Image: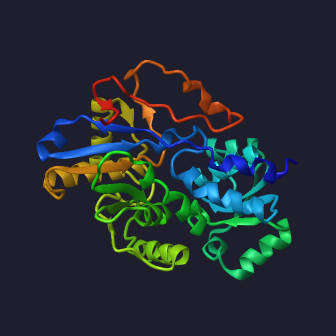
Amino acid sequence: MTDPGRGSREFDRTPPSPLEELDDPRLARAGVRVILKRDDLIHPLLPGNKWRKLKYNLARAAELGHETLLTFGGAYSNHVRAVAASGARFGFRSVGVIRGEEHLPLNDVLAFAARSGMRLVYMDRTTYRAKGTAPVVEELRRRFGRFYLLPEGGSNEQAVRGCAELPGEIDVPFDVVCCPVGTGGTLAGIAAGLAAGRRALGFSVLRGARFLADDVARLQAATYGEVSANWTIDHDFHAGGYARRAPELDAFADDFAHRHGMSLDRIYVAKMMWGVFTLAERGAFPRDTTVVAVVTGAMEAAPSSRPARAGDDEAGALPPALHPSRPAGAGDGRLRPPP
């Protein structure tokens, strides 16, 4: 096994992700400028908030001499996939504790995790609900030995630190940063990293998730000893709940793909963008507001929307080092780098 410490210097080598401004008449009418923060381009297998959440956790695991990462997730968890990829890249063994029973053949997410060397184990749903309790964790340690524990979704103090670096990468004037919210870590970090006078707006992807505000506050308090007052969460664009779809969401995402040539991830990113556009058209943002919308999950080119770009074939393999983020969509008349 590769010594994790050998690769620890590489945890900080990720360059800033690019900014791209949306050219859309609906936004122009509302007097709102929307700039995408293309975190999906950080790395094909560790995109967006996944890398930001894992970066300092991996460094911490290496510092403590851990050889195994253990985490939790559902059968389609992108977090599980990212932990498997980062374990393979940086020389950690990995264990994925999956909610529910095993289903064969494995879906694409779990098949990738297994190919990356992750050991997949399954936990009944009743026990899974208590996954963070001492008895369950102690039983996992008895079974798998010493490991570095990553929570479901990856949101902890180290994740918040990673996400707090995002606002410092935005080199254009802006007023609001928006992001999807699933476990609260990304919003907690972004809000903590904002300069005075700017605010963060999260869009919950969960139905009835009023508890998310408490989770964001808890994460900020645990990381920094205080809770900032510069963030809010909108609960109106969940489309029925996690991984659920609604006709309004599908119509928006299809129209976005037609207009801008990019297919939105409908679990997270599409819900945020649906919310941003709806609020802009309602006048919820004052005119001349600049919104930065963080693309936390994969976006793909809509069919026949653009020519192939160099690097499009990279998603099947993890290269030796994280490649530089590459601009996407520039020059197509619909997405462009901001001036």
Above or below, 98 against 37 in this view is below
Residue 145 position in % (x across, y down): 85, 68
Q: Residue at x 40, y 60 (%)?
A: 241
User: In the rendered image, is residue 291 in sight?
Assistant: yes
Q: Quadrant of residue 338?
A: top left
- Quarter that holds the C terminus: top left
Q: Position of residue 162 (x, y in %)?
A: 55, 58
Q: How is the image coloured?
A: rainbow
Q: Residue furthest right?
A: 1
Q: Is residue 326 left or right of residue 64?
A: left
The number of numbered discs placed on residues in the rendered structure image is 0
Q: Position of residue 107 (x, y in %)?
A: 63, 44
**What residue sits 36% from the left and 47% below the top?**
270
Residue 198 image offset from top left, x and y in percent: 30, 61
- Most foreground residue, 233 or 326: 326
Q: Nearer the viewer, residue 312 or 15?
A: 15
Whether 20 is drawn above or below 309: the answer is below
> Is residue 97 shown to the viewer in this render?
no
Answer above or below: position of 335 versus 278.
above
Q: State the residue at coordinates (42%, 46%).
A: 295
Name the residue rendered at 43%, 44% in the picture.
265
Left or right, 297 with reference to 329: right
Choose between 208 and 45: the one closer to the eye: 45
Spot the residue most to the top: 307
